[in-house]
Amino acid sequence: MQQQDALLWTLEEISRLVSNSGNPTETLTNIVELIQRRFESDVCSVYLLEPDRSTLVLAATVGLRPESVGRVRMRLSEGLAGLVGEQLRPQVVEDATRHPRFKYFKEAGEDPYHSFLGVPLVDRGLLQGVLVVQTIEPRVFDDAIVRMLMTAGTQLAPLVSEARTLGQFVAPAHRRLSEISQNLWWSWDAEATSLFRDLDPVMWRELAHNPIALLQRIPIDKLEDRASQLALHGRINYTYRRMQEYLASTRTWGARDAGVLWARPVAYFSAEFGLHESVPIYSGGLGILAGDHVKSASDLGIPLVGVGLYYSQGYFKQRLDLDGYQHEEYLDVDSRILPIRQATSPDGAPVTVTIETRTGAIAARVWRLSVGRNTVLLLDSDVPGNSPEDRTLTARLYGGDDRTRIRQELLLGVGGVRALKALGISPGVAHLNEGHSAFAALELVRLRMLREGLDSNDAIGRVSQQVVFTTHTPVPAGHDRFSAHAIEEHLGPLRDALGMGHEQLMALGRVNPGDENETFCMTVLALKMSRRANAVSSLHGQVSRAMWTGLYPGLHEERVPIGHITNGIHVPTWLASPMHKVFDRHLGPDWPRRCAETSCWEAIETVDDGELWETHQALKARLVSFARRRAAASAERRGEPAEFVAQIRQSLSLDALTIGFARRFATYKRANLVLQDIERIVSLVNDARKPVQLVFAGKAHPLDRPGKGILQEVSRLMRDSRFAGKVVFVEDYDINVGRHLVQGVDVWLNTPRRPLEASGTSGQKVVLNGGLNLSILDGWWAEAYDGLNGFAIGVGETHTSIDVHDARDGEALQAVLEDEVVPLYYDRDRDGLPRRWIARMKRAIRTLGWRFSADRMVTDYVSKTYVPAAGGTSSDMTRS
């Protein structure tokens, strides 16, 4: 190190250390990073004196664990840093662990460091904190080094003093908001969400409702001004306290009814998790269902660990061209604005996993994501040592070819199990959400063989008792299949460890084990490796049993061991705040805890018709404003003519019957069914007295050309003069777009080709927000419709001819619109209220709200699959 008698830094250099945003934490981080580099130490830390002037708190560090900041505290009478502050002079120690004042903080991760040099930070004669450098190798710092660090401390003490002042009066609010933002609990708590929105509503919208990004953009002083103007400090403290109480509570359904899972939790494997729009690791229904499952498990107090992949580019951004054709755009997600942190093992080391293949190893690090009381682990292959191909392996959700897909699924399944083991988590249940994660069962078998000295057959028998498998796909093309060569390349080393031959392993993924021409199916593997399997609606259960009857020779279709647990939605996530307040007033403040009980919803009949109607109308106005704004912005980006953009800004009417359609644009979902008789739909939308308008959203898979064609057909309606102002297509369907639509539409349109809709949860989200379903009797609606809680398209019949099937459904859709939906909506009394329509709204809420909630769904999983799989039932006499 070069000796210097002069000051270490110029005023210009010191000024650059100050955070541009006024964030004291950022300033202190800049200081410790600069000193650590200049003094060539392994650790540099700043401890600030608390307002009590008797306690030091770790405020910034390079070298110690980041999570220890704010947590490591010591009195001036304890610890080496305390000794520096107590005596107001430098302390030089060759091996800190042998000093009598040494105090060990496990969370700091300072075990490797020995030498210690600490100097007091004094400004205007007052102690402000302590500056410390440490090294791994025992080292005696000479007098010159001590003088230099003292000089540095003297120069930097004013900055530390300022940061300390800001920290005392502003940072507590900022810190609490930051801590709230790090747990996705905020995303389904209306008060927490409103806190972030109120700080800066425009920026909140621009940043995709990302609180971490918001807090990084708002300077500390501006945040304080805003908090003072709006009297937010009390709300911040209240929200923070409620979050802490929520996380610590043991008075939950799960604490009472899922006891066995507390010893060995559920490991929930899913290729995607739709938790919030700011965490783009989902594409559609499967991910949204997984996200709702994790959230409800948290609310119910079910110990569950999600296992998925970290997609650094997420799913694609949708962009339509001037001809209405979809193009895909992939953008890198900045992990620094996500509520994730690297997972560490019980001994504090970062967790990484490695999977051997015949052509080399694939490594991944593991991120942790807090979702209420539960955790989701995300594996990320973008790590040094991986090949360029594998570093981008987890970049995109459902991107790439079969080779990419099998490597992703190997990482999800086998890597996911290894991540759990590295974290010391021993699950009692492995829940495979769709076949993407089925390789997890093979890794569980390998571990069971290793622990118990079993052969593979015995281990499979024991593991399968603990595996739960949920299938979501009634479409044969939706089940992943891989060639024998791909399986051998990627599963070969695992097969060796299992003591299996190649054909023996392939047989686990074949309907006909001896057919060497049959490919390896992930769904077949999952069914063979699980004792409990379920579809996601009653009708889907029938379809699944028929689809897989070949796996169970000798069994009648009805005896095929695939049951069903119908999907539900996480009510707090999808319920609009104004409607939430209506329920608070009439159902009681504890209704969210009782939302899966039938009795909870009886009181909806006592709600004043006008109150319910006006609340829904306000939500529709919000949807109209949102759809106009988004569609106009997309049109401007495409370079549309100014008059067309102006038309979109005035599109949609606040008092017209508004129909919404939003989902994946797969051909079997038939988004264009409503256009089958174009002249009849034109007459409906242009009826001067009883107008109808439509809002569409959705993405087609990048490789689905027919789906893209349907999307183009629908999006072009905005340019058709017959539909001008009556049809809007909202680009880039995501959770935020979906939230606005399900909360604001009058009618939710669902037109799948029966029986190809597994469940379809979007329509469930509409119910509690006052919308009515207009749907083919497929998926959940086939078991939900009672004749008075919505509308049905047809009577549930199919036809062997697709053309006949579609023509018949198209006619039925047009008929129910003309004869039932439109007349009922516009049938008003003297007060302008559609009383019979409102009666259907209330009936839908009363009969469907409890039944299709995720709380009901998760309690079904717990009682019917998780507890039995974990060996926690006290009696079971149901044996065939």
Image (cartoon, rainbow, N blue to C red):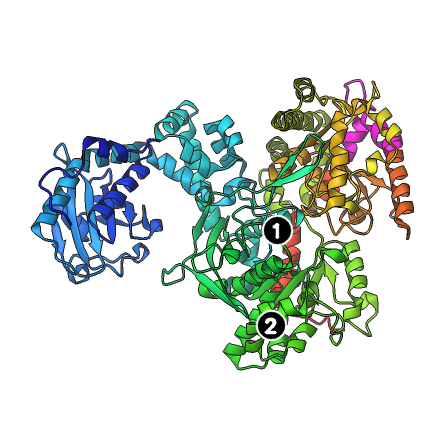
Q: What element carries label 1?
A: loop
- Spatial CA distance of label 1 from label 2 is 31 Å
* Discs 1, 2 touching: Cβ within 8 Å: no
Q: Which of 591 and 376 is in front in this view?
A: 376
User: Residue 177, position in %: x, y?
Assistant: 42, 37
Residue that carries the numbered disc 2 in the rendered image: 463
* Residue 826 is one of the magenta-drawn residues: yes
Work out whether 332 lies above or below 197.
Answer: below
In the image, is 800 to the left or to the right of 861?
right
> Who's the residue at 19% across and 31% down the image?
11
Dominant secondary structure of the residues highlighted in magenta in the image? helix
Q: What element carries label 2?
A: helix
For discs 1 and 2, the disc positioned in front in the rendered view = 1
**On the image, which quarter does residue 697 sit in?**
top right
> Who's the residue at 80% across and 17% down the image?
830
User: Residue 235, position in %: x, y?
Assistant: 44, 32
Write the start and end of the magenta stretch as one range.
817-841
> Who's the residue at 29% across and 52% down the image?
63
Are there few (<14), some (14-19), or many (20+) residues within 10 Å of tag 1?
some
Residue that carries the numbered disc 1 in the rendered image: 399
Work out whether 511 lies above or below 152.
Answer: below
> Who's the residue at 48% across and 50% down the image?
369
Upstream in sequence: badge 1 or badge 2: 1
Which amino acid is tagged 1?
Answer: Gly
* Residue 142 is one of the magenta-drawn residues: no
**On the image, which quarter does residue 345 sit in?**
bottom left
